[in-house]
Image (tube, helix red, strand yellow):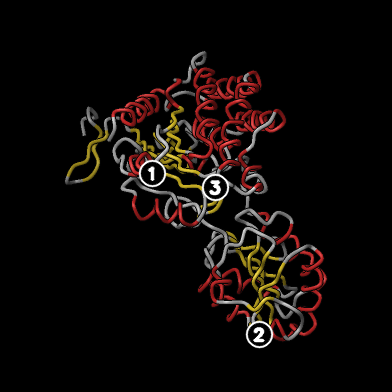
Amino acid sequence: MTTEFLRVAHAAREAAAELAPLPRAPKDRALRAIADALVAHTAEIVEANAKDVEQARAQGTAEAMVDRLRLDEARIAAIAEAVRQVADLPDPVGEVVRGSTLPNGLELRQLRVPMGVIGIIFEGRPNVTVDAAALCLKSGNAALLRGSSSAYSSNTTLVKVMQEALAGTEVPAGAVQLVPGLTRDSVKELMRARGLVDVLIPRGGASLINSVVEESTVPVIETGVGNCHVYIDAAADQELAVEILVNAKAQRPSVCNAAETFLVHADVAAEFVPKALEALRAAGVTVHGDEAIARHGEVVPATEEDFFAEYLSYDIAAAVVGSLEEAVAHIRRYGSGHTEAIVTRSQQAARRFVALVDSAAVAVNASTRFTDGGEFGFGAEIGISTQKLHARGPLGLPELTSTKWVYTGEGHLRTAEGTVIAGSGS
């Protein structure tokens, strides 16, 4: 590993040890200091961001991606407000997850504790730099950040502003670090920093996530891509189903909880599909349908790849299925384990769908767009986990902690005969 990487990694490690025992108040003061500093340094941040934007346009980057990269006064103010909102959230550190008094008199508690150093690899938007740092600090962790090279100038300035803000607080300035370097070598260093980094969270597209999962020696919490499905059951309220489908796809198509496929029970396909195609067309959505869908309207013929696709655009795949079980089988084959929805008036069908679908979230008569930390009432999130170990679903503050067991006795000793209390004379 390079000297420069080791410098920031060790700085984060030392800061994590200082940060872990801090109570809520100093962490909240530090977050509010960061928010104020972001606003105060708006001109400096915008100037640095302009370099990234100029470079992106010179490289022929699509204007939609350039817009995701761009920062202005209003966006910086919104980022600062998001930091203040994190400060207002409950502190998970020290929460008693469960506890009891054992038959031998030992008092047993499981407490939430910080993980230590959280490495985060992410693409695109520089606001993630601040969001990730704020969530890590609030949960008592140091943040080791590796953003997109396209936002390097912005990220460098944002981290500098945050570190300067922390320097005047009880939170160590080293708790927010930017991994140096613009090449993939710096990403590899972070992925191989086992012993320096406690957990790694990739946030981005499928290729980034798969690369980190496959190559990292640091434990990974896998945030997932979103090939989300909406299944219209034979017992669905069809008008409601159309509204849910259009919202799930078109309300904001570029996010992981947007629907990418809809499935229709064969018993209602002739009636429902024309309504759905008309509504989706009016919303600007292109439907990639199988042969059964195509019998009821004009669509782009669907390929196998369409059913695996996370479009993140105004496109959606569609198929007709013979039963609820066939819909579930389709989801198991093509889905990403993010969010699946059923629209039905049958409680039995809803219960069976919920029981059979293996995803982080299942929606009944609701849009897939609600799978979100803020919508769930958790506040901010770092992403949506689609794996099953440690955390699943929105990764809010509690999910950025681990636990430790604490047991308290009165001189308890374990012997072959059982428990004795030291000094009790027994």
Q: Are marks 3 and 1 in contact (CB under 8 Å)?
A: no
* Residue at horizontal 39 percent and vertical 53 percent from the top: 213
Residue under label 3:
383
Residue under label 1:
184
Of the numbered discs 2 and 3, the one sitting upstream in the chain is 2
Q: Quadrant of residue 266?
A: bottom right
Task: Report whether 244 appears left or right of 116.
Answer: right
* Residue at horizontal 32 percent and vertical 33 percent from the top: 409
Location of residue 330 in the rendering, given as x and y in whole percent from the top left corner: 56, 76
Q: The residue tagged with tag 3: helix, strand or loop?
A: loop
Of the numbered discs 1 and 2, the one sitting upstream in the chain is 1
Location of residue 112 in the rendering, given as x and y in whole percent from the top left corner: 45, 38
- Please tell me whether residue 224 is drawn above or below residue 81 in the rendered image: below
* Residue at horizontal 63 percent and vertical 27 percent from the top: 46
Of the numbered discs 3 and 1, the one sitting upstream in the chain is 1
Near mark 1 (Cα within 10 A), the count class, few <14, some 14-19 or many ≥20, is few
- Please tell me whether residue 379 is drawn above or below residue 28 in the rendered image: below
Location of residue 309 in the rendering, given as x and y in whole percent from the top left corner: 56, 66
In the picture, the quarter occupied by the N terminus is top left
Task: Report whether 368 appears left or right of 109.
Answer: right
Q: Which residue is more in the foreground, 229 or 103?
A: 229
Near mark 2 (Cα within 10 A), the count class, few <14, some 14-19 or many ≥20, is some
Identity of the amino acid at label 1? Answer: Arg
Q: The residue tagged with tag 1: helix, strand or loop?
A: helix
